[in-house]
Image (tube, grey):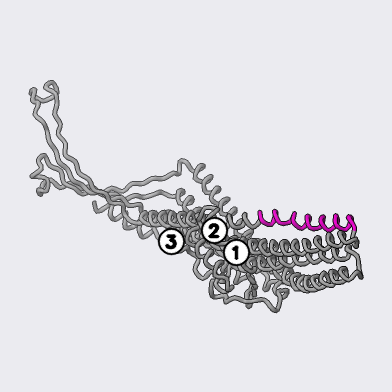
């Protein structure tokens, strides 16, 4: 027993060696600042960046829906299950660093035939055994350590996936909520304008009956009213679709929120400000970029796992137990059994396959590097796009606000002039058409400005101090 133990001690001393490349974070140059940051409106509402941004908007319905989604969204539960699975696999991989110990026992009775037994004896032979076995792979070149390292990085990547999905779910819900309120505001505008046009139609019909109008004016007025009414079904469809989407995002059936969301509410004012954020700080915060980097780390570690097969794999085994012919003698001093063995497994005769697996692992690391670099570029692109969309939509809304105010006044004056006989019906209809277009465009721009604010927070992954659902373990 001394010689195998001495060999195992020597092998353990050599186990400080670890084959394969050590992971080093790639050095990827990024800009010093966001070029579109200066274009954000100076009057933007800036929620507290240290808090969950949806609680800073003064809209309790939106805040409640987001909290519901974080707790009950089914995609988040699936991502959480993937994270739990990765953590369990990591615990299993760590057990490979320690001996595997098992225990067992058996009781048997063997009876030979009369022809087989000596002297024709057919008595039964009984035996009893209890034993414990241990098996330990001596991590000579770090194969087990690299496997644990790879699984640890994979678990981190799954955590990043969960964080990225949480950001995506919250962003999707906030955008859908803004779409809902935008559709309801546009519905209000269309219905209000339709009511004004009904009044105009009644006025034209009255004047026509009094001999001061024509059938042509009546037909034009009715045509404009029908055109306005034709807008309403599409907006009602958009409203219903948004309600259904919000329900599913919060883990409910599509019809669950219809009654709760039917009452219109103002479009939330979602502003954004990146303060002292830089591309580097954003990349450090983005969970999708972190997940891509952890996958690169895991792929790098797997090169070492495959490279270890170029070297012999040593396994130390041992057995301790007791064996006797009678149950009462099982633990007697003469019934002890033991075994210590050192096994060597070496794939040097299959070196071609080993090197092929190493090359495949290296290609996997190259793939993970390219995916990480792409994730960085996409993150920077999404941030710049979100900043410019939010800024442009804000400026557009400012102009459309003034246009809507002026067009409403123009429509009022046109009706006054028409009733006084100072202008024709065409002037009234044109003014009402322009008013409808301006107010509808303003509602759409406000919704897009709010959606742009959500996009900035999603791109920066800001406002999520806790990235795991309440059910996380």
- What secondary structure is marked by label 2? loop
The residue mark sitting in front, 1 or 3, is 1
Lower sequence index among marks 1 and 3: 1
Q: Nearer the viewer, residue 233 or 213?
A: 213
Residue lying at 46% horizontally and 52% vertically, measured from the top left: 305
Residues packed near mark 2 inside 10 Å, few (<14), some (14 to 19) or many (20 plus): some
Q: CA distance from mark 2 to mark 1?
A: 11 Å
Write the residue at 70% across / 79% down: 42
The quarter holding residue 292 reads bottom right
- The residue singled out by tag 1 in the image is 263
Circles 2, 3 touching at the beta carbon (< 8 Å): no
Q: Earlier in the sequence, mark 2 or mark 3?
A: 2
Q: Nearer the viewer, mark 2 or mark 3?
A: 2
Q: Is 90 in the magenta?
A: no
Identify the residue under disc 3. 471
Marking on residue 257: 2
Magenta span contains residue 233: yes
Q: Is residue 438 above or below residue 309?
A: below
In the rendered structure, which segment of residues is drawn in magenta?
Answer: 214-237
Q: What SS does tag 3 mark?
A: loop
Residue at figure coordinates x 31%, y 54% from the top left: 99
Q: Quick check: can you spot residue 146?
A: no
**Label 1: element kind:** loop
Residue 163 percent across, percent down from the top left: 52, 62
């Amino acid at each position: 027993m001394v010689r195998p133990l001495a060999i195992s001690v020597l092998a353990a001393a050599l186990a400080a060696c670890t084959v394969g490349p050590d992971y080093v974070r790639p050095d990827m140059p990024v800009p010093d600042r966001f070029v579109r940051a200066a274009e954000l409106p100076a009057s933007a509402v800036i929620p507290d960046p240290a808090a969950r941004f949806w609680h800073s908007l003064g809209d309790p319905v939106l805040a409640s829906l987001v909290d519901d989604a974080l707790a009950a969204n089914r995609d988040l539960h699936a991502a959480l299950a993937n994270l739990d699975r990765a953590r369990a696999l990591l615990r299993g991989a760590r057990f490979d660093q320690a001996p595997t110990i098992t225990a067992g026992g058996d009781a048997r009775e063997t009876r030979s035939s009369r022809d087989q037994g000596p002297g024709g004896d057919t008595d039964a032979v009984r035996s009893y055994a209890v034993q414990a076995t241990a098996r330990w792979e001596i991590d000579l070149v770090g194969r087990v350590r690299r496997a644990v390292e790879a699984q640890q990085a994979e678990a981190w990547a799954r955590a990043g996936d969960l964080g990225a999905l949480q950001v995506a779910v919250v962003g999707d819900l906030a955008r859908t909520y803004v779409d809902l309120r935008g559709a309801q505001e546009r519905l209000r505008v269309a219905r209000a304008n339709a009511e004004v046009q009904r009044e105009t139609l009644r006025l034209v019909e009255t004047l026509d009956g009094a001999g001061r109008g024509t059938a042509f004016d009546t037909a034009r007025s009715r045509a404009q009213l029908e055109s306005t009414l034709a807008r309403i079904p599409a907006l009602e469809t958009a409203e219903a679709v948004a309600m259904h989407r919000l329900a599913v995002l919060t883990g409910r059936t599509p019809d669950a929120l219809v009654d709760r969301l039917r009452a219109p509410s103002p479009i939330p004012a979602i502003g954004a400000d990146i303060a002292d954020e830089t591309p580097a700080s954003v990349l450090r915060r983005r969970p999708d970029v972190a997940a891509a980097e952890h996958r690169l780390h895991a792929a790098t570690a797997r090169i070492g796992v495959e490279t270890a097969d170029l070297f012999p794999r040593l396994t130390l085994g041992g057995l301790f137990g007791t064996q006797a012919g009678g149950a009462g003698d099982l633990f007697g001093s003469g019934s002890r059994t033991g075994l210590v063995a050192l096994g060597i497994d070496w794939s040097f005769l299959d070196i071609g396959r080993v090197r092929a697996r190493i090359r495949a692992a290296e290609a996997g690391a190259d793939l993970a590097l390219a995916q990480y670099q792409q994730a960085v570029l996409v993150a920077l692109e999404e941030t710049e796009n979100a900043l410019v969309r939010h800024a442009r939509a804000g400026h557009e809304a400012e102009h459309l606000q003034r246009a809507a105010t002026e067009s409403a006044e123009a429509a009022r004056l046109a009706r006054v002039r028409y009733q006084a006989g100072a202008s024709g019906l065409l002037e009234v209809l044109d003014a009402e058409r322009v008013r409808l277009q301006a107010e509808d465009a303003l509602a759409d721009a406000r919704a897009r400005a709010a959606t742009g604010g959500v996009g900035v927070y999603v791109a920066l992954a800001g406002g999520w101090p806790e990235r795991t659902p309440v059910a996380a373990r």
